[in-house]
Amino acid sequence: MRLISQIRDGIPEDLTVHVGQHDETICGKTDRALQAGLDYLARLGGGTLKIGPGVYTMRNSIHLQSKIRIVGAGDATVLKKGPSVRTKLAEDSDWYYQSVKVESPETFAIGDGLVLQAKPPNSNFQCRRFTIIGIDGQTLFLDKQLVDNFWVGQEATCASLFPVICGEKVTDIEIRDLVIEGNREENENINGNYAGGIFMQNCDRINIDSIAVQNYNGDGISWQIVHDLSVTNTRSINNAGLGLHPGSGSQRPQMRGNQIERCHLGIFFCWGVKHGIAEQNKIRDCDVGVSIGHRDTDNVVRENVISGSSKHGLLFRKESYDRNGHRCRIERNQFRDCGAPEDGCVIYIAGPTDDITLKDNQFEETRKGAKVKAIVTAAETNGLLVEGNQYSGLEGPD
């Protein structure tokens, strides 16, 4: 009898649950079957959830628990978000409520994921995620207590918007070999600080490998205050927001070998992202390839191919000196046809920074008549090292 389970990457190896659309341990075609398998594993201390081929309709997120590995059948396993609907609140709900009364309850079902949103005056836009656990007439009962006021006079609404995979306060997670289809045409946009094709918050040790996140009306993959997260060999394509969003306070993110195309921004280092690596990614046809800003210090952007960025290949956002992204290294990247063709620039350091290294990068411009500068820096830039770069079709400062 085995007394001690084998463990790899913090996840028990012995227990596997198969979910599929035919003769599997759990049979189903929706998020409910997937969540049932995951919860069973979590109850026994963790393990592997294998998802068979097919399209799974998602009316709510897969809500992760710690020590879980999710493995699909590659491009044959598709988690597709259902269409979003929105209704106004019919009366006020205060911060201590656990229900809301809505104008059109018939568009929702028990188990659905949703967000409550409101626009209080002189305050930040409010957005909170919930699951419906009961319906009585116009009243939706929620899985959590409200922590904000949602008032009719502040444009309070309820919408079926959610991440397809969501983790909050979990550790030791692996997700690989599947497709997340965001169904962008049938969904409203949601800000990447609250959701994404995959959304993680307050987590540690997350590995995402060999998946595709596509057509999500928001960020492809977003993580906030998540440490030691890696994204490798993954496709983030045609998402309305950010391709990869290492978010506020995240330490040591690793983004390697990914393909990012036709997103608003490719890789967006948010607030206070430190000691991250973006390496050997292919970033194409985004407004900005890589963006670095508020206290994003000590990051490395290396050996990426960045092409077709309509504004900048790489941007250091404008911040005050004490809030800027210092001591970052931009090395051995290829920048091709980036920047506005009439008077743009490929790399723009918009604010005061210390000790930025731009070394051994290749800049290429092939667009006919384009007048693009390779590197433009703010006057307050200190300790900038520009060395060993090569320029074809445009001029550089070194």
Image (cartoon, rainbow, N blue to C red):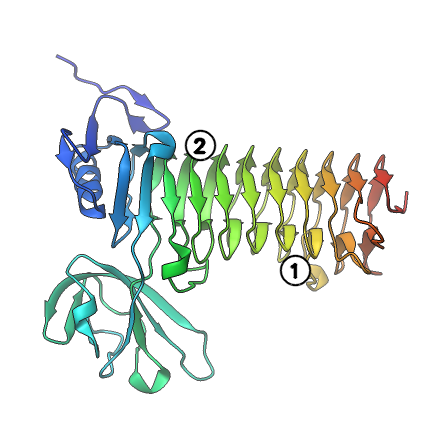
Identity of the residue drawn at 29% across and 55% down:
82
Identity of the residue drawn at 58% across and 53% down:
265
Q: Quadrant of residue 178?
A: top left
The answer to whether residue 268 is visible is no
Disc on res. 210: 2
Against 100, is 15 above or below?
Answer: above
Q: How many marks?
A: 2
SS at circle 1: helix
Q: Quadrant of the C terminus?
A: top right
The three-letter code of the residue at mark 1 reads: Arg
- Mark 1 closeness class: few <14, some 14–19, many ≥20 residues within 10 Å: some
Against 215, is 171 above or below?
Answer: above
Identity of the residue drawn at 84% across and 42% down:
386
Q: Quadrant of residue 157?
A: bottom left
Q: Nearer the viewer, residue 216 or 317?
A: 216
Query: x%, y% of residue 377?
Result: 81, 56
**Residue 231 shown left or right of residue 293 in the figure:** left
Q: CA distance from mark 1 to mark 2?
A: 35 Å
SS at circle 2: loop
